[in-house]
Amino acid sequence: MSGEKNDAIVVEDVSKVYRLWPEPSARLKYALFSGLQRPKRHSLPSPKEAHYFRDFNALSGVSFRVPPGQSFGIIGRNGSGKSTLLQIIAGTLQPTTGSVQIDGRVAALLELGSGFNPEFTGRENIFLNAAVHGLSQREVGARFDAIAAFADIGEFLEQPVKTYSSGMALRLAFSVMAHIDASVLIIDEALAVGDIYFTQKCMRFLRAFREHGVLLFVSHDMSAVRSLCDAALWLDAGQPRMIGPAQDVTGAYLAEFNLSQDNREVSRPTPTSSPSDPPPPGEAISAAMRLRQLPEPPVESELSVSTFNTSSASFGDGLMRIVDVAFKDTEGRILTNVRAGNVVRLVITAEATEPVSNAILGFNLKDRLGQHLFGENTFAALRGRTVALATGERIMADFVFQMPVLHRGHYTIAAAAATGASENHRQQHWLHDALTLMSSTDWPHPGLVGLPMLEVQFARSAAPTAVLKE
């Protein structure tokens, strides 16, 4: 395979062979046997040589190219050669055969802590790591405040890196990588250890980076690969299994992975109440809620909900500000736990800091990678009517919906206050992580969210009778 002149990454027939020795003394015995002559590393061992060692092919004949402006994913099971390939592309490991060409400055985040001196402070390691990537002390000094703000590890910046947790090490490493003006970013599963807020910050940066740079991304999270990557390579036991559009490659990988799993019956608890059971005495249910009250689906999926995050990252013009976001029951009490399938109220309250003529409130539910799963705003519900607010006046939007089933993990609610119309508006206050949700469900379901089925029926019918034409 030959790449175009302007390809950002060209990988040509790359292979990596490791020589495995059964015991340390085998190296010395083989050296004596071979007359201290180094054999060709990529040649097959003779029967006598095989007595001393065996060759392990970590990679075999891997070729692909990535044009500028494209994001490329590498997927495969553990031990398939993904990390080995990234190390070769990053230049920290030499291939046995083949070649790699990269056009531009490369920044790699392969192993947490790699490139850091554990005895140095975070501040010292920023200068050290950036210098390794070709930045001068003056350039690093000019960007230091931005790097420190992105990492957001506070006073730990002055502590030795050896005292950092894996999440703090990720914050520092990613922050440096994000500020060295690289044209090629290489990331190997590092985001898996970050907290949800920093992971989403990283995903926002990566999505913006894709507009002008090349991203090489390894992950076991197929949703992340589909979200970030245009094309992908599937490695299987060190060999290319499939290469093509990310949607097609991840789909084929998941199909084979699912088919290879043992079939297991999933037990689902039976409903504890009948749809016809009346609400408990004294419970106030609004007319709107009563009309929307649905039977409880047979799904055990509990979501814990955080309190309103007043320190969430935000942006906007500032004519309005969001002062509260919460899940509430029909009596206005804040809910700290929500069950999938339940009808819930998400209440967003905003205050005008200056007079506004047309206020809009809305929300998005995002997964840990920052992907928008669903959301709504008040513009459509107003049906052309406008909401004007005087300075200091507040507005409250009440979104009533049935909570879907969410895969196990962390999610966030992004809340927004805007002015204008749905197709032409300005954000006044956007809160990235107004609420955090933690799903503990063990119910497997396809897709990003699961719909709690209220009822599933099927019927048997006889095979149609063939009609003979005369």
Image (tube, grey):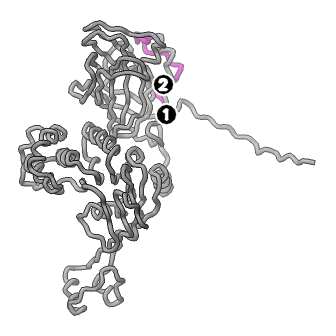
Which residue is found at the position 42% from the left and 58% from the top? 233
Q: Which label is found at residue 451? A: 1
Q: Give left or right: position of 354 versus 172.
A: right
In this rendering, the answer to whether 207 lies above or below 340 is: below
Which residue is found at the position 25% from the left and 50% from the top? 182
Where is residue 3? Give x, y as percent: 40, 63
Task: Indicate the amino acid at tag 2.
Answer: Ser
Any part of residue 67 in sight: yes
Foreground: 96 or 134? 134
Extreme residue in the top direction? 390
Where is residue 62? Give x, y as percent: 39, 66
Q: Main secondary structure of the magenta part?
A: loop
Q: Give left or right: position of 136 versus 18.
A: left
* Mark 2 vs 1: CB contact within 8 A: no
Can residue 281 be found in the magenta stretch?
yes
- Image quarter of residue 465: top right
Magenta span of residues: 271-286
Any part of residue 237 in sight: no
Residue to which mark 2 is pinned: 273
Where is residue 85? Give x, y as percent: 32, 63
Which residue is found at the position 31% from the left and 16% from the top? 349
Which residue is found at the position 70% from the left and 40% from the top? 460
Foreground: 322 or 88? 88
Q: Give SS at disc 1.
A: loop
